[in-house]
């Protein structure tokens, strides 16, 4: 089966499943709120003066997370109202990068924020992340591709 057909089926399954879409909505709205809270805390603590280089870099990544998670939240809200139209819009592939940018930039921003306080705070999450990725990739490599029944069972439409 071509890759485009699989991704189209995935997008249609996700954005027509209200339950799964609500989980994605909570995830992106939570990351949006955490990014906004970072800026509120930063402004109340430091204002515009005296930011270290680590906090300036963290602020750059948190600003990317703020905007991209806001967009992802809006798309998920639109998906709850018009799931089929949203699935068609998203299946073009442009939306795929926005959640990745939102989650990734927030994770990188948190690491740079930790680096402001201590290198140990930064090194431990990086080591744990690489260890988790290695464990997940070895687990995923043992899985076989999903057949139609398993795909429907996993991503089936739920009301």
Image (spheres, grey):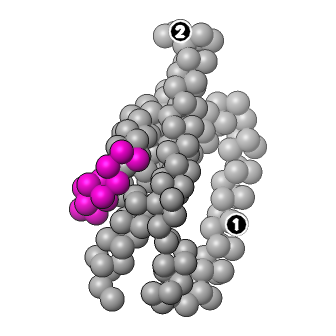
Q: Pick whichever, 116 or 142, lies toward us.
A: 142
Q: Residue at x 70, y 58 (%)?
A: 127
Check the image and report above or below for 157 versus 5: above
> In the figure, residue 72 lies in which quadrant?
top left
Image quadrant in which the N terminus is located: bottom left
The location of residue 34, given as percent across then percent down, is 58, 32
Q: How many marks?
A: 2
Q: Residue 47's mark? A: 2
Badge 1 element: helix
Badge 2 element: loop
Q: Residue 131's mark? A: 1
Circle 1 residues within 10 Å: few <14, some 14–19, many ≥20: few
> In the figure, residue 107 lies in which quadrant?
top right
Check the image and report above or below for 159 versus 115: below
In the image, the segment drawn in magenta is: 80-94
The location of residue 43, given as percent across then percent down, is 54, 13
Q: Residue at x 40, y 58 (%)?
A: 15
75 with respect to 41 (left or right) = left
Q: Pick whichever, 146 or 125, lies toward us.
A: 146
Q: Residue at x 55, y 78 (%)?
A: 153
| Magenta part, dominant SS | helix
The location of residue 87, given as percent across then percent down, is 31, 59
Q: Pick whichever, 156 or 99, lies toward us.
A: 156
125 with respect to 104 (left or right) = right
74 with respect to 141 (left or right) = left
**Residue 115, magenta (yes or no):** no
> In the figure, residue 97 lies in which quadrant?
bottom left
Circle 2 residues within 10 Å: few <14, some 14–19, many ≥20: few
Check the image and report above or below for 45 versus 14: above
The location of residue 7, given as percent across then percent down, is 35, 72
């Amino acid at each position: 089966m071509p890759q485009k057909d699989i991704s189209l089926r995935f997008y249609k399954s996700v954005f027509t499943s209200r339950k799964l879409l609500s989980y994605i909505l909570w995830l992106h709205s939570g990351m949006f709120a955490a990014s906004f809270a970072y800026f509120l805390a930063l402004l109340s603590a430091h204002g515009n003066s005296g930011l270290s280089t680590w906090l300036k870099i963290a602020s750059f990544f948190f600003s990317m997370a703020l905007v991209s998670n806001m967009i992802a939240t809006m798309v998920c809200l639109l998906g709850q109202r018009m799931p089929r139209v949203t699935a068609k819009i998203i299946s073009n592939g442009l939306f795929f990068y926005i959640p990745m940018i939102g989650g990734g930039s927030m994770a990188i921003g948190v690491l740079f924020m930790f680096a402001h306080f201590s290198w140990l705070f930064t090194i431990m999450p990086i080591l744990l992340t690489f260890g988790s990725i290695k464990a997940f990739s070895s687990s995923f490599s043992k899985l076989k591709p999903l057949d139609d029944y398993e795909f429907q069972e996993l991503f089936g439409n739920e009301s």
